[in-house]
Amino acid sequence: MASFKKYQLSMLPIHLFFIAISAMFIIPLLAIVSISLSNEVDLSKFGYQLIPLHVDFDAYRYILEYPMTIINAYKVTIIMAFVGTFVSVLIISMCAYALSRSDFTYGRFITFYLFFTTLFSGGIVPYYILMTKVFHVQNTYWALILPLLGNIWNMFLMRTFFKALPDSLVESAKIDGASEMRIYLTIIVPLSTPVLATVGLLTLLVYWNSWFASLLFITKQSMYPLQYLLQVMLSNIQEILKNMQDGGIVDTAALNKLPSESARMAMCMLAIAPMLFIFPFFQKYFAKGLTVGAVKG
């Protein structure tokens, strides 16, 4: 009994540490929700609150004034995110599987070449010319998908996982006459669910939060993804407020009709809400996918 109490006391600092870490993640999310439901008057007078003094949906009403625009942006983002994630995970896993094989002749050279690309960039101008003058993908879904296709860090993560799988599985399959593609599809992929789910989640988050490719290659509003559309709306709000102030419109009531800080957080909630629902389905694979294969043997 005494040893059990001693164990509980020794674990108390660890529990308090992780409670503090959890609070650091939860409190900002609660603050975002609270600010998005607050009005501009309360925010200007009392600052940010974890619990809104007066619940106000003006920020959401302003953003959703034209709902079809938001719905279309969600459509573009969903197509971009899920198609891009599927194609990216497919390419990354096939490349990682080839590089994980010890009998692949050019494995070291290709690994060094891929790693070298993470150290240097060709620059925005050649990148823009390649996408617009060579591939001609501006104002298409490919302009949103191609720039993020094939993350090298994820490929190395997946290669490490594949290396941890027993070589005897591949050898026995080859003895039975299985082709490389069949080994990959029927043996490697089913055994790699944790790392595939982890890389898929990381890739999905990158695509969902992507906006820079839209800034460079998208000019049609019907092709705006969610993140870029929200950024444009926020810029419009700031420009309107600036014009009102420069034009001598200083009436507080008039300025408060146009949400600013609350609109920022409402946009944030619209952007992150779908990912908050998706993450729990990947959570059980996430930690395992990042750690399994880290130690081989």
Image (cartoon, rainbow, N blue to C red):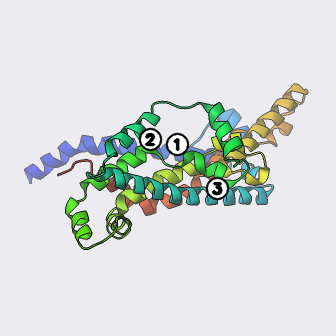
| Towards the viewer: 135 or 42 | 135
Q: Do the residues labelled 1 and 2 touch (CB within 8 Å)?
A: yes
Above/below status of 64 relative to 51? below
| Towards the viewer: 74 or 248 | 74
Residue at 75% over, 37% down: 235
Residue at 36% over, 45% down: 19
Residue 3 percent location from the top left of the image: 8, 49
Q: Earlier in the sequence, mark 1 or mark 3?
A: 1
* Residue 200 visible to an observer of this rendering: yes
Residue at 71% over, 55% down: 73
Q: Residues within 10 Å of mark 3 (few under 14, many from 20)?
A: many
Above/below status of 195 relative to 210? below
Residue at the limit of the structure toward the bottom, as seen here: 176
Residue at 63% over, 33% down: 126
Which numbered circle lies on residue 77? 3
Kind of residue sitting beneath label 2: Met
Residue marked by disc 1: 28
Residue 58 percent location from the top left of the image: 75, 50
